[in-house]
Image: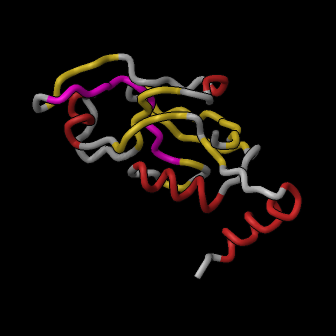
Amino acid sequence: MVPANIVTQVVPQLIENGEIAYPWLGISGTTLDDDLAQAMDLPIEQGGVLIFEVIAADEAGLRGSDEQISINGLNAFIGGDIIVQMNDEPISDFDDLLAYIVRQTSVGQTVTLQILRDGEVEEVEVTLQARP
């Protein structure tokens, strides 16, 4: 069974273009886990998506990680923006972010991200592009 909101997004694209364009935020990142939160001097229970690299959303002013550290013998990157909300929808992990983008957005749509940057909450607007 396919959810109705997916059908309403897909069918018009297929009719008009003969193909489907999937929305893409233009970042790479990971779920902010306890170790990463602690390394960034944040509360351990802080959720969100830590941005590693900004690939296509740089005009929005998002920042990727800029410091490499070792956690439990593994290399990790810290220091990037942390996405905690998209259009008033809480984002606690990377799966939340992907699910919201796929189910609730479309290519060309502008979304409002609430981010943590250097411990401060900020809002930025990003226009979603077609995933390459």
Q: Residue at x 45, y 30 (%)?
A: 81
Q: Position of residue 85 (x, y in %)?
A: 51, 47
The extreme bottom residue here reads 1
Q: Position of residue 98 (x, y in %)?
A: 51, 52
Q: For residue 72: magenta? A: no
Residue 57 horizontal side relative to residue 53, left or right: right
Magenta range is: 74-85
Residue 50 horizontal side relative to residue 16, left or right: left
What secondary structure prevails in the magenta region?
Answer: strand
Report the number of discs: 0
Q: For residue 77, which quarter of the picture?
A: top left
Along the line of sight, the residue nearer the viewer: 75 or 84: 75
Answer above or below: position of 98 versus 65.
Answer: below
Along the line of sight, the residue nearer the viewer: 71 or 121: 71
Q: Position of residue 82 (x, y in %)?
A: 43, 35
Name the colour scheme.
secondary structure
Q: Position of residue 91 (x, y in %)?
A: 46, 51
